[in-house]
Amino acid sequence: MPAYTYNPFWSGGSYGGFNPITGLPQDWYDTPLSQQADLPYGEFERFLSNQGFGGFDNRSQWARSMYNRTSSGYDAAQLSNPDLTYRDYLNTLTGQLDDAWASLTPDQRGISTPGQTRWVRWG
C-alpha cells in the first residue's frame, strides 16, 4: 500500500450536502448547524488532514496518537475560557504538531536504520 500523504477517508468537500436555497453543493462546516455538533474525533481528523497528517505514514500515525493529549489540553484550556470550543482550540495548534514531530529523534519517529550500524571485529 502506498504511503498516502492525504486522507483517503476524508478529502474535504460537501459529501452530498446541498444548500436548500441555491441547490449548489455546500460544505456545512462553517454553519451553526455543524458548529453545534459534538464530534471531537471528527473535528480532530479534519484538523489533521488539513495540516497534512492524513496519510498512513509514521508522521500521520504519530499525529493521530496525539488525540488524547489534545483532548486533555482542551480540558485545561476550558478552565481559562469555558466558552472555548474544541474547534477553536485546535485552530490554536496550527504548526505545533509539525514542530513536535521535528523535535523527535529518528528512533521516536519509528525510523530504523540498521544499515548504518558499524561493526568492528577483532580477529
Image: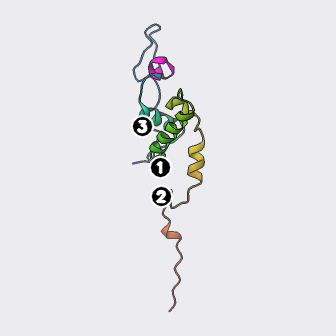
**Three-letter amino acid code at the position of disc 2:** Gly
Crowdedness of circle 2 by 10 Å Cα count: few (<14), some, many (20+)?
A: few
In the picture of the structure, the residue carrying the numbered disc 1 is: 62
In the picture of the structure, the residue carrying the numbered disc 3 is: 8
Q: CA distance from mark 2 to mark 3?
A: 23 Å
Contact? badges 2 and 3 (CB < 8 Å): no
Please give the label number shown on residue 120.
none
Where is residue 74? Give x, y as percent.
51, 37
Q: Is residue 90 visible?
A: no
Contact? badges 1 and 2 (CB < 8 Å): yes
Q: Nearer the viewer, mark 2 or mark 3?
A: 2
**Three-letter amino acid code at the position of disc 3:** Pro
Please give the label number shown on residue 110.
2
Say what secondary structure mark 1 lies in: helix
Q: Is residue 37 above or below residue 74?
A: above
Q: Nearer the viewer, mark 3 or mark 1?
A: 1
Q: Residue 28 or 120: which is nearer the viewer?
A: 28
Magenta segment: does it hold 16?
no
Where is residue 62? Give x, y as percent.
47, 49
